[in-house]
Image (cartoon, helix red, strand yellow):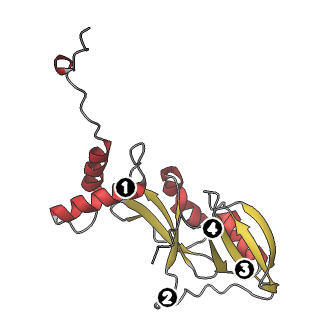
Amino acid sequence: MQKLQTQGVHHITLVGADRRTSIDFWQGVLGMPFVFEQPNLDDPETNHLYFDPGDGRLITVFTREDTKPTPRPNPMGVGNLHHLAFMVSRATYTQAKARLDERGISNSGEVDRGFMYSIYFRDPLGQLLELATYKFDPPVGFTHADVLREAHNIRVAKGAYNIADEHLADAIEMLSRKPDPVPSGDAPSAAKT
């Protein structure tokens, strides 16, 4: 059987409450531009809001005006969504706790994940969200996943519990290596005519 090869996340859809709660949170708190809305084509009593999380893809939310927010956390169970993580710049990340605190949104504060920093909080409907920023930029021509794959291999070889800064630095160095230039004395000579 051939694989159905994915090429990235197209969109994620959440079940929201009323329209205003979703717009206030996704656009007002997280700064995701409100792209458009239309009826949910499977249920005309439900509205469908579309937001841009910053990479041109979509986060969408089903809303109903007769549904009010309940901040009860999602149940922890097999098959349930645990959390959504959104990438932010380091500059934005350093401001996240203060800005969430200003809005009265309870949060975890900074959490060091070894290869990234995270902060966790809940949306008005209890969904756990994460703002994450990598500790590194990949070398030109490589992705974050390339660096993490190599850092993992280095970590395992060293018997370390989790990826740490030293593993990231070594992975970046390894990926950045270019073939050494041929010393001038060893350069192939031009063909004699």
**Could you say which quadrant of the image residue 101 lies in?**
bottom right
Question: Neighbour class for label 2 at 10 Å: few (<14), some, many (≥20)?
Answer: few
- Pointer 3 or 4: first along the chain: 3
Image point (54%, 64%), residue name: 8
**Residue topped by disc 3:** 62
Q: Is mark 1 on a helix, strand or loop?
A: helix
Q: Hey, what amino acid is under mark 3?
A: Phe
**Residue topped by disc 4:** 103
The residues bearing labels 4 and 2 have C-alpha atoms spaced at a distance of 31 Å
**Could you say which quadrant of the image residue 112 lies in?**
bottom left
In front here: 172 or 10?
A: 10
Q: Hey, what amino acid is under mark 4?
A: Arg
- Pointer 3 or 2: first along the chain: 3
Q: Residue 113 vs residue 94: left or right?
A: left
The residues bearing labels 3 and 1 have C-alpha atoms spaced at a distance of 35 Å
In front here: 71 or 179?
A: 179
- Pointer 2 or 1: first along the chain: 2
- Pointer 1 or 4: first along the chain: 4
> Which residue is most to the top?
193
**Residue topped by disc 2:** 79
Tag nearer the camera, 2 or 1? 1
The residues bearing labels 3 and 4 have C-alpha atoms spaced at a distance of 24 Å
- Pointer 3 or 1: first along the chain: 3
User: Residue 108: which disc?
Assistant: none
Say above or below: 149 vs 189.
below
Q: What element carries label 4?
A: loop
Image point (46%, 74%), residue name: 2
Question: Neighbour class for label 1 at 10 Å: few (<14), some, many (≥20)?
Answer: some
Q: Find residue 129 and report its horizontal and vertical position in percent.
A: 54, 72
Q: Hey, what amino acid is under mark 1?
A: Asp
**Residue topped by disc 1:** 146
